[in-house]
C-alpha cells in the first residue's frame, strides 16, 4: 500500500494536462482549491441554464434565457461613440434585436451574415417594449448547435476562469475517470437506487434539469456518500487501532462510588446514571475505552467524570483529569475536592505553576502510587511525569483536542482508557463527522432543583436602568457577571472596553464592589480576582470572554452580556450557563446595540426561548454552517466538496455504521470490497487511514 494505485494516476496528474488549462488558469484554479484533475471531477455545477430550442422568444417571460433559430436581418452600426451595435433578427413569430457593445463591424458581418439562419442563445430582456438579447452566449449554425447541451451546467468560478473553460476542463477530467470496482455495500446501492461511481460523475456533470442539481439527486447523493464513507472508514480505523492497543479490564467493587453517592444532597439524573454505567462497562472490557461525554451546561459532567475516576481507583489504579487552562484545572480541583474527601481518596493538582520542591514531592508521590487522582493542565504530559498505574485519562473541553492528541494521551498510560468531556452540545450530524472514532454518552437532563434562567433582551440605550436595578440586586446580597463585548479589531481594544466598563461600574456601584478579569492579566492576578468574586469580597466581576468555560460560582445569579449581538449562539449559551447554578432565581440580560440584523435578532430570540443546548446548537448550525460553528481551523472537521454535513446527517450516520461493520468483518480490508475501499481511500486522499491499515 506504499504508493497510489496506477488506475488513479491520471486523476492526480498535473492540472495543465486538462483541455484548455494553461499555467495562468492552473494558478487561478489552485487558489480555489482545485489543484489536480481529481478536484475538477469533484467540483460540481451549482446551477444550470435551460437551453432547450424554442420556436420563438415569446415562449419565455423576460428576463429569461431563450434559445431560438432566427433569420438575420439588417445591421445597425452604432450612431455614436457610446452607442451599441444592433442586429435585427426574426424567429418563427416575432422580430427582436441582438445588441453588442464595442463590436467591430467586419466581425459582426462574419458572425451574423444578413439573410442566413443561426441559432442564438442568451438572456432576453425588454427595452422600451422591444425584446432584445444583449451579447448572446452562443451564436451557432444548426450543425454546431448539436454540441449545445439542452441544459447547460453552471460551475462556481474563480479568478477570471470562464464557464466555457470550466465546461471543457470538466469534460476533459471526465475522460480520465477510470472505471473502478464498487466500494459501496450492494444492498445499500440497490435500496437507494444509486448509479456506479463512474456513471454518477457523468450524471452530476451533465444535469438534465434543475432537479438533478439538488443534493437529493441519486448521483449527487452517491458522490456525497463516497466522501462520508472514506471519512468514516478513516475514523473507524483510528478507533480500531485505539482499541487494538491492548486495553486492560478495569472493574471496581463500587465501594468508593457508594460513599460519594451517599454524601450527595441529591440523586443523580437518569442521564447521569446511564452515562456512568456505559463508562463502567467500557472500562471493564479488555479493549481500550475511547468515549465522548457530551453534556449541556450544568448537566453534571463533573460527577460522571469522578465516578469514572473512582472505578480506576477501586481497581487499584490511578486517574488523571486534564483541562485546557489553569483556571479550569483549578476549578475542577475545587469541584472534586469535597467529593474526593467523602470517598477518602488523595486528589492533587499539577499545573505549570508548580516549581521546585513542591513539584518534586508531587511527582514522587504520583510515581509511588500515593496520589489516586491527578488534576492538571497539559503539564501532566511532560516527560518527567510518571504514574504508578494510570488506568483512566479524562480530557475536558474536547474541541481543543484532535484525534492525534487523543492518541498521544492514550500513550501516556500503558493502555489507559480515555474519556473526553465537552460542554459544547454538538448537533448529531457534526458529532458524527468529528467524533466518529469515539463512542458517545449524552447528558441531556438538568439536575433536579435547577431553576430556569430568566433571559431578557434590552437595548444598550437603557444601560443606566440596568445599573440601577443591578444596584438594588447587590443590596440584597446578589452577585453578577458583566461580560464586555467582543471587539473585532484587537485584544487591546477588547481590553480597553473592559477597563472603561470596570471604571464606570466602580463609580456607579462603589469602589470595592467591582473587580476585573481579562486575557492579558498575569495568571496569579486573574486567580486573585476570581477568588475575590467567589468569596463574595467583590460582588461584580467585569470580564472579557475568559469566563466562558467552566467558571463556577453558585452564588452568582445575574449575567449581563454587553454587545450580545456580536457573540455566537453557542457562546451566549455557554456564558448564560455560568449563572443558575445555585439556589437563587437567576437572570441573564442581553444588551444589544440597535438596529439588530435579521440573524442577530433571531439568535437572541432563540436564546430567550430555550435553554436546551442541543436545540440551540442545531439552530446555530442552521444559521452559521458547520465550519464556523466549531471554528474549522481547530475543529478537526473535514471539508467535503460534495457532501453537506448539515443537511445530510442521516447519510453520515449510514456511512458510520457501514464503516464500522465493514472493519468488524474485514479488519485489514483484504476482501474484494475491502480492496475497492482501499482504492476509495486513495481517491479521497485519506493517507492517514492508509497508514493505519499498513500498521494494522
Image: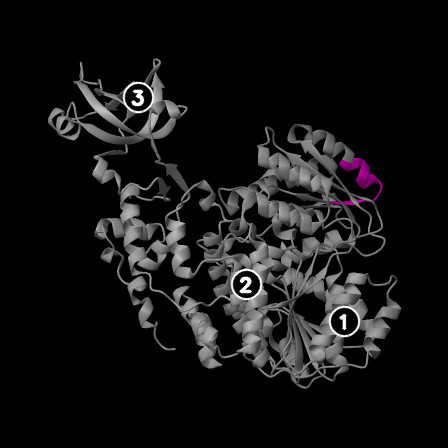
Other residues around mark 1 within 10 Å, as few (<14) / some (14–19) / many (≥20)? some
Query: Which residues are drawn in magenta?
Result: 470-480
The residue that appears at 32% across and 62% down in the rendered structure is 11
Q: Nearer the viewer, residue 641 or 327?
A: 641
The relative height of residue 241 versus residue 559 in the rendered view (above or below) is below
Distance, label 3 to label 1, CA atoms, is 73 Å
| Left or right of 39 in this view: 315 | right
Name the residue beneath numbered marker 3. 132
Residue 682 found in image quarter: bottom left
What mark, if any, has residue 350 been given in the picture? Answer: none
Disc 2 on helix, strand or loop? helix
Q: Position of residue 614 (x, y in %)?
A: 68, 51
Q: Which dot, 3 or 1, sits closer to the camera?
A: 3
Image quadrant where one finds the N terminus: bottom left
The relative height of residue 463 versus residue 688 in the rendered view (above or below) is above
Other residues around mark 2 within 10 Å, as few (<14) / some (14–19) / many (≥20)? few
| Left or right of 57 in this view: 380 | right
The residue that appears at 22% across and 30% down in the rendered structure is 118
Q: Is residue 298 visible?
A: yes
Q: Position of residue 430 (x, y in %)?
A: 58, 56
The residue that appears at 36% across and 44% down in the rendered structure is 155
If you read the primary sequence from the N terminus, does the residue marked by circle 3 or circle 2 appear first?
Answer: 3
Distance, label 1 to label 2, CA atoms, is 34 Å
Disc 1 on helix, strand or loop? helix
Name the residue beneath numbered marker 1. 277
Q: Position of residue 200 (x, y in %)?
A: 42, 56
Amino acid at each position: 500500500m506504499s504508493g497510489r494505485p496506477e488506475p488513479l494516476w491520471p486523476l492526480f496528474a498535473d492540472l495543465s494536462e486538462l483541455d484548455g488549462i494553461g499555467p495562468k488558469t492552473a494558478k487561478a484554479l489552485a487558489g480555489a482549491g482545485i489543484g489536480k484533475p481529481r478536484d475538477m471531477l469533484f467540483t460540481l455545477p451549482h446551477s444550470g441554464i435551460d437551453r432547450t430550442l424554442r420556436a420563438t422568444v415569446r415562449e419565455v417571460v423576460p428576463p429569461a434565457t431563450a434559445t431560438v433559430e432566427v433569420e438575420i436581418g439588417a445591421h445597425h452600426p452604432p450612431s455614436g461613440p457610446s452607442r451599441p451595435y444592433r442586429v435585427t433578427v426574426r424567429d418563427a413569430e416575432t422580430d427582436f434585436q441582438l445588441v453588442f457593445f464595442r463590436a467591430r463591424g467586419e466581425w459582426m458581418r462574419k458572425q451574423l451574415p444578413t439573410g442566413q439562419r443561426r441559432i442564438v442563445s442568451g438572456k432576453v430582456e425588454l427595452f422600451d417594449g422591444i425584446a432584445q438579447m444583449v451579447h448572446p452566449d452562443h451564436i451557432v449554425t444548426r450543425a454546431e448547435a448539436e454540441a449545445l447541451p439542452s441544459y447547460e451546467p453552471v460551475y462556481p468560478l474563480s479568478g477570471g476562469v470562464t464557464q466555457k473553460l470550466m465546461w471543457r476542463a470538466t469534460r476533459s477530467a471526465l475522460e480520465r475517470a477510470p472505471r473502478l470496482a464498487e466500494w459501496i455495500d450492494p444492498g445499500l446501492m440497490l435500496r437507494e437506487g444509486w448509479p456506479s461511481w463512474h456513471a454518477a460523475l457523468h450524471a452530476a456533470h451533465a444535469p438534465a434539469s434543475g432537479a438533478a442539481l439538488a443534493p437529493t439527486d441519486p448521483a449527487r447523493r452517491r458522490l456525497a456518500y463516497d466522501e462520508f464513507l472514506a471519512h468514516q472508514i478513516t475514523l473507524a480505523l483510528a478507533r480500531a487501532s485505539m482499541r487494538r492497543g491492548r486495553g486492560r479490564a478495569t472493574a471496581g467493587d463500587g465501594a468508593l462510588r457508594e460513599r460519594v453517592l451517599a454524601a450527595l444532597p441529591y440523586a443523580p439524573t437518569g442521564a447521569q446514571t446511564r452515562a456512568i454505567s456505559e463508562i463502567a462497562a467500557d472500562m471493564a472490557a479488555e479493549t481500550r475505552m475511547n468515549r465522548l461525554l457530551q453534556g449541556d451546561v450544568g448537566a453534571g459532567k463533573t460527577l460522571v467524570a469522578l465516578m469514572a475516576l473512582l472505578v480506576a481507583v477501586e481497581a487499584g489504579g490511578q486517574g488523571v483529569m486534564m483541562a485546557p487552562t489553569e483556571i479550569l484545572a483549578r476549578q475542577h480541583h475545587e469541584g472534586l475536592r469535597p467529593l474526593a474527601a467523602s470517598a477518602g481518596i488523595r486528589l492533587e493538582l499539577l499545573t505549570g505553576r508548580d516549581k521546585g520542591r513542591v513539584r518534586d514531592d508531587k511527582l514522587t508521590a504520583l510515581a509511588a502510587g500515593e496520589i489516586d487522582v491527578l488534576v492538571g493542565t497539559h503539564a501532566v504530559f511532560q516527560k518527567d511525569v510518571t504514574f504508578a498505574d494510570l488506568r483512566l485519562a479524562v480530557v475536558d473541553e474536547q474541541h481543543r483536542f484532535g484525534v492525534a492528541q487523543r492518541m498521544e494521551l492514550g500513550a501516556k498510560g500503558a493502555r489507559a482508557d480515555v474519556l473526553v468531556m465537552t460542554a459544547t452540545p454538538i448537533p448529531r450530524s457534526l458529532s458524527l463527522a468529528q467524533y466518529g472514532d469515539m463512542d458517545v454518552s449524552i447528558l441531556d437532563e438538568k439536575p433536579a432543583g435547577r431553576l430556569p434562567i430568566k433571559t431578557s433582551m434590552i437595548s444598550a440605550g437603557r444601560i443606566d436602568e440596568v445599573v440601577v436595578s443591578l444596584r438594588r440586586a447587590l443590596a440584597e446580597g446578589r452577585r453578577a457577571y458583566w461580560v464586555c463585548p467582543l471587539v473585532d479589531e484587537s485584544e487591546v481594544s477588547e481590553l480597553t472596553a473592559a477597563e472603561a466598563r470596570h471604571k464606570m461600574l466602580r463609580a456607579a456601584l462603589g469602589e470595592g464592589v467591582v473587580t476585573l478579569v481579562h486575557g492579558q492579566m498575569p495568571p496569579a492576578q486573574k486567580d486573585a480576582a476570581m477568588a475575590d468574586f467567589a468569596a463574595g469580597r467583590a460582588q461584580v466581576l467585569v470580564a472579557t470572554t475568559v469566563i466562558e468555560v467552566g467558571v463556577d460560582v453558585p452564588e452568582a445569579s445575574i449575567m449581563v452580556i454587553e454587545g450580545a449581538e456580536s457573540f455566537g449562539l453557542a457562546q451566549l449559551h455557554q456564558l448564560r450557563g455560568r449563572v443558575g447554578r445555585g439556589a437563587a432565581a437567576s437572570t441573564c440580560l442581553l444588551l444589544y446595540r440597535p438596529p439588530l440584523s435579521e440573524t442577530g435578532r433571531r439568535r437572541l430570540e432563540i436564546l430567550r426561548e430555550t435553554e436546551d443546548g442541543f436545540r440551540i446548537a442545531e439552530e446555530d448550525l442552521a444559521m452559521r454552517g458547520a465550519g464556523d460553528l466549531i471554528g474549522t481551523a481547530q475543529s478537526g472537521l473535514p471539508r467535503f466538496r460534495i457532501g453537506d454535513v448539515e443537511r445530510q446527517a442521516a447519510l453520515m450516520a449510514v456511512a458510520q455504521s457501514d464503516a464500522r461493520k465493514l472493519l468488524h468483518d474485514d479488519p485489514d480490508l483484504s476482501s474484494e470490497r475491502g480492496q475497492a475501499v482501499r482504492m476509495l481511500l486513495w481517491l479521497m486522499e485519506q493517507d492517514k487511514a492508509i497508514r493505519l491499515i499498513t500498521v494494522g
